[in-house]
Image (cartoon, rainbow, N blue to C red):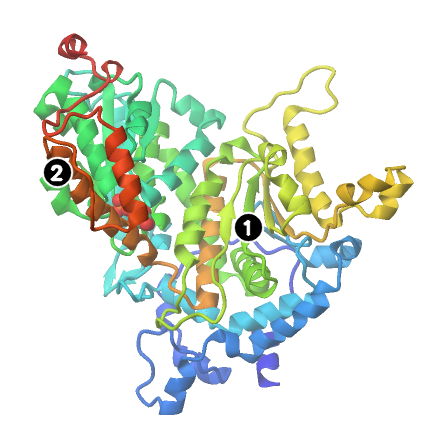
Amino acid sequence: MQQAAIALQSSSWHGAHLHTRPQAGRRQHARRGAAVQPQAAFAQIGHTDTSHMSSAGSSSSSSQREAKRLPIAYSPEWMALREHTKEVESLHLRDLLVDEERTDSLVREHNGLYVDFSRQNVTETTMQLLLNLAERAKLRTKMNAMFAGEHINNTEDRAVLHTALRMPRDEEVYVEGENVVPDVWSVLDKIKDFSDRVRDGEWLGATGKPLTDVVAIGIGGSYLGPLFVHTAMQFDEPCKELARGRRLRFLANVDPVDVAKALNGLNPETTLVIVISKTFTTTETMLNARTVRTWLTAELGQEAVAKHMVAVSTNLKLVREFGIDPENAFGFWDWVGGRYSVTSAVGILPLALQYGFEKMEEFLQGAHDIDCHYRDAPFQDNIPVLMGLLSIWNSTFLGRSSVAVLPYCQALAKFPSHIQQVAMESVGKQVSVDGEPLPFKAGEIYFGEPGTNGQHSFYQLIHQGRVVPCEFIGVVKSQQSVYLKGELVSNHDELMCNFFAQADALAIGKDSVTLRAENVPEYLIPHKTFSGNRPSTSLLLPSLSPYRVGQLLALYENRVATQGFMWNVNAFDQWGVELGKVLASRVRTMMHTARTRSRRITITDGFNPSTRKMINRYLDGKNQMLYPEPQDIFPCDLIHSEECEAKF
Ligand SMILES: O=P(O)(O)OC[C@H]1O[C@H](O)[C@H](O)[C@@H](O)[C@@H]1O
């Protein structure tokens, strides 16, 4: 009784508004989270889970300590949702979608964004039960702790404050007693100054030429986000104009083919290289950085590094050791996770060089707008919270293990891969923040492609195979307008016709009665039947300006944070990527030994038979590199020197 009353008081689905009021322009009180009294909230709902807090009350009894360890999966709110799945599984979206009142209650708007959750397998009760679960999970307290700079990344003892990266200059947020917003802005000011100078031709290359091309070297979080934003902005007319005569390339993979691709057709004299790595230790990035440095210096000499190479990192010591003047480095902080770093210098520097700093400011403002909405809006109107809760519902309760992100917008082609890292690296976890095994599966498999391409590829499975919750993203005003005389609709309208049709095809399906009425032969009826009842969310953006791209980014970042808070996992560490790195390093040592012997050697131990045989096969087959005299080898078209031409 007590819990139900509190849920209605703080997060009631019944009181949900159709439209939420825009939060833009509201002054942010970043420190307010610090004032929240977690223990008071604990007492209020009689809740025993304080596990996410850095320090529990000193008066905890042993039973409280025991209760503290109880995962949310044993709470009555969780059980209620489990029980409720039976009711929902007996309903079909075909029937639910005729109810206009239900649709209205499941649409949310915020500052130009329109999000329709009506094609989710939910009823009003589902939404209320999910809000109750959010109360039980202490979602608000956890969100406040994040915004307040508490060390919620407990395994690395770090704050999680990517939201501070997009705060206006006059905001305040404190990490260990220090307001970090001035630091954020000092780096942004430095980026503005540097990118203006490069773009205006004041900062010249070693031979006095303007630097018109940029190669950004980085991987994972130091690559996917900037690539997504670059792809999104490339054909926005104002951005396109601002980027005229400039090229931005990315180099991520340690595969030398990616080096060839990134440098293809570039001239070292006019190329600026940015080495982007939070740690400045990532093997792939550092080898690529050394490779491109060799490409530069082979033609321009060692001194060229000062004019042609800059860095983005938290590790200025290693930047210096690499040979880049820390004056030419753009810092960020350990409270910015790699996959949450697009709004730090990681993304802002390369993108400001390409499009100008003002456009990047718009992008930051869009992200900040959503951060404010996430922090302030009541849960029933809070779009990232609702997206997160529905993800929990679909994956953990209804057992749907994947999510398809389907932008009907070619400019968002790289968005699914970026979100794939944000989501899968954040919440693909096996234990809770306390290290206790999870009694449920956390995380989902994210994939996606722009529509309509995906329709001609994997949509078969999502229509008639497994149930995959889909997220359709459409844009009202395209960045490009094409309408051919004599065509029924413009090209963008054609694209969007598919956006509308696919969501309904998934939800409504097509039954045998309809097929028979269409005289479909009996033997084909099972093949042509669409069961429907497949959930999706549709998100409509007014346009794809840098501001809207910023909103979209923050929407998904905050949605993933919500999922982490709900599942009580640490969404900000990534221990699961370590083991492969360690094993690769063992193989590297062996590979060096094998390659530097004068005679071919065969690996006989140190690896399991499968790996050993495969390695021996590889060593036998690959002999084009002449160890032990490694040399800096580049294909001729990558190096502009007569010496090279003579050599090859
Ligand atoms: O930016 P870096 O330190 O080079 O890290 C690059 C990437 O490497 C990793 O292994 C992590 O899984 C990613 O989260 C990270 O973004």
In the picture, the disc for residue 322 is 2
Dot 1: within a 10 Å radius of its alpha carbon, few (fewer than 14), some, or many (20 or more) residues?
many
Residue bearing the label numbered 1: 403
In the drawing, what numbered circle is on residue 557? none
Answer above or below: position of 242 versus 477.
Answer: above
Q: Earlier in the sequence, mark 1 or mark 2?
A: 2
The residue sitting at 44% across, 80% down in the picture is 70
* Image quarter in which the N terminus is found: bottom right
Instruction: State which quadrant residue 481 falls in.
Output: top right
The spot of residue 364 in percent (x, y) is 40, 44
Q: Amino acid at mark 1?
A: Val
> Residue 606: image x %, image y %?
20, 51
Instruction: Report the front residue among 272 and 457.
Output: 457
Image location of residue 24, percent across then percent down: 49, 50
Location of residue 144 with respect to 351 vertically, above or below:
below
Q: Which residue is depicted at the point 13% across and 10% down? A: 643
Question: Residue 193 versus residue 464: which sits nearer the camera?
Answer: 464
Percent from the top left, x then y, of residue 462? 63, 45
Quarter of the picture containing the C terminus is top left
Question: Toward which corner of the image does residue 227 lie, by quadrant?
Answer: top left
539 sits to left or right of 229: right
Viewer-side residue, 409 vs 599:
599
